[in-house]
């Protein structure tokens, strides 16, 4: 059974940085797409960044391009989201998710099979 556990959220000020981690277990993930998603109060869950585990190919939402970086450590089965130049509009619960098939940044979050419990990121102005 695939399990995903996020960590690293917190409260920061505008312009600061945070790094989220996602510990994955239960599979080799070699053919998976894994990614970071977020949901702000009153809004739908949205894709932030995804990575194809086998090739480390990455895709980003336009709103975070140039500020966020997704990466993965294959040996440790860890996925990261480095978030720089944070803005108040980045405030949300951040989730990591995984799916057995190749997905793109436009794939609806509902298509992902496995989810973590989420970690809160709050950016104060």
Image (cartoon, rainbow, N blue to C red):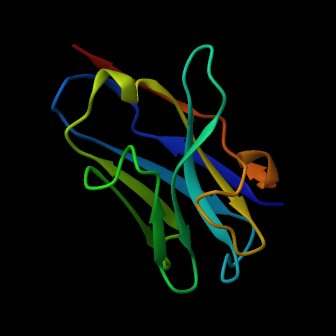
Residue placed at 41% from the left, 50% from the top?
A: 62
Residue placed at 25% from the left, 34% from the top?
A: 86
Residue 5 drawn at (x, y percent): 60, 46
Tally the numbered discs.
0
State which quarter of the image contains the C terminus: top left
Residue 104 drawn at (x, y percent): 63, 66
Please determine whether, in this image, residue 24 is positioned above or below residue 44. below
Residue placed at 59% from the left, 34% from the top?
A: 118
Residue 79 drawn at (x, y percent): 48, 61
Please determine whether, in this image, residue 15 is positioned above or below residue 74. above
Q: Quadrant of residue 98?
A: bottom right
Please determine whether, in this image, residue 21 is positioned above or below residue 71. above
Q: Is residue 84 left or right of residue 33?
A: left
User: Nearest the camera: 46 or 9?
Assistant: 46
Residue 117 drawn at (x, y percent): 66, 35
User: Nearest the camera: 25 or 67?
Assistant: 67
């Amino acid at each position: 059974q695939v399990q995903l556990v996020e960590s690293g959220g917190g409260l920061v000020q505008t312009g600061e940085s945070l790094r989220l981690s996602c510990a994955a277990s239960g599979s080799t993930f070699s053919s998976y797409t894994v990614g970071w998603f977020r949901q702000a109060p009153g809004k739908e869950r949205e894709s932030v960044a995804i990575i194809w585990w086998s090739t480390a190919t990455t895709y980003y939402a336009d709103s975070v391009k140039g500020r966020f970086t997704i990466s993965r450590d294959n040996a440790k089965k860890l996925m990261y989201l480095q978030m720089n130049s944070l803005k108040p509009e980045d405030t949300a619960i951040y989730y990591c998710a995984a799916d057995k098939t190749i997905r793109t940044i436009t794939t609806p979050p509902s298509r992902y099979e496995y989810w973590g419990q989420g970690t809160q990121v709050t950016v104060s102005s």
